[in-house]
Image (cartoon, grey):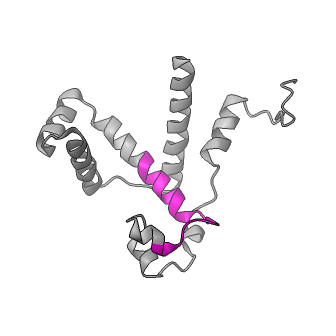
Amino acid sequence: QAEEQARSTVKAQLVLDALANQLDVDVETADIEAEINRHAQSNNMPPQQIASIIQQQGSLPALLGDILRRKAIDEIIKAADVDGGPADEVLAELGLADQDDEEGADDGSAAEDVPAVETPAQAAGDATDGGDSDDDTDGDDEK
């Protein structure tokens, strides 16, 4: 079971890495600082100590990968056309709306800026079945 979860995690990371590459997502110094600050707050430690630990453990590449994947997810969500969600006012009240959303500046062009990509579920499905398209939609598990 742990091996299957590890495989699933690696597949998801590879898909997100590919999406980040396709979307030209970049990690900037401010992103790294924000992530270090987030870790510092959640661990109740000073940011300098978190940065030192990252450096000592050599885990900066893993941190950069996490930031890159998170930004790729953010880009996908930003470009998504969601129907039936909460009103912008509710999102703003909860602190979940972007400034642009609160000001009504969304002109619907965000989706036009993002190239068409497979969803992580689609890509993971391709990876697990070797690209075969003999989906078992009737649920009888027969091939």
Q: Is residue 85 above or below residue 100?
A: above
Return the x and y of residue 125 as percentages of the image width and height.
69, 36
Report the magenta stretch's main SS.
helix
Q: Nearer the viewer, residue 25 or 70?
A: 70
Magenta stretch containing residue 74, yes or no?
yes
Q: In the image, 5: left or right of 39?
A: right
Return the x and y of residue 80 as percentages of the image width and height.
58, 62
Q: In the image, 74: left or right of 11?
A: left
Q: Is residue 3 above or below residue 136?
A: above
Q: Nearer the viewer, residue 31 or 28?
A: 31
Counting every numbered tag in the picture gives: 0
**Quadrant that contains the C terminus:** top right
Return the x and y of residue 98 as percentages of the image width and height.
41, 69
- Residues in magenta, as a range: 69-89
Q: In the image, 16: left or right of 142?
A: left
Q: Residue at x 63, y 66 (%)?
A: 84
- Residue 46 is drawn in which quadrant? top left
Return the x and y of residue 102 as percentages of the image width and height.
43, 77
Q: Residue at x 18, y 32 (%)?
A: 53
Q: Is residue 103 above or below residue 6?
A: below
Q: In the image, 122: left or right of 103?
A: right
Q: Nearer the viewer, residue 74 or 87?
A: 87
Q: Residue at x 43, y 55 (%)?
A: 25
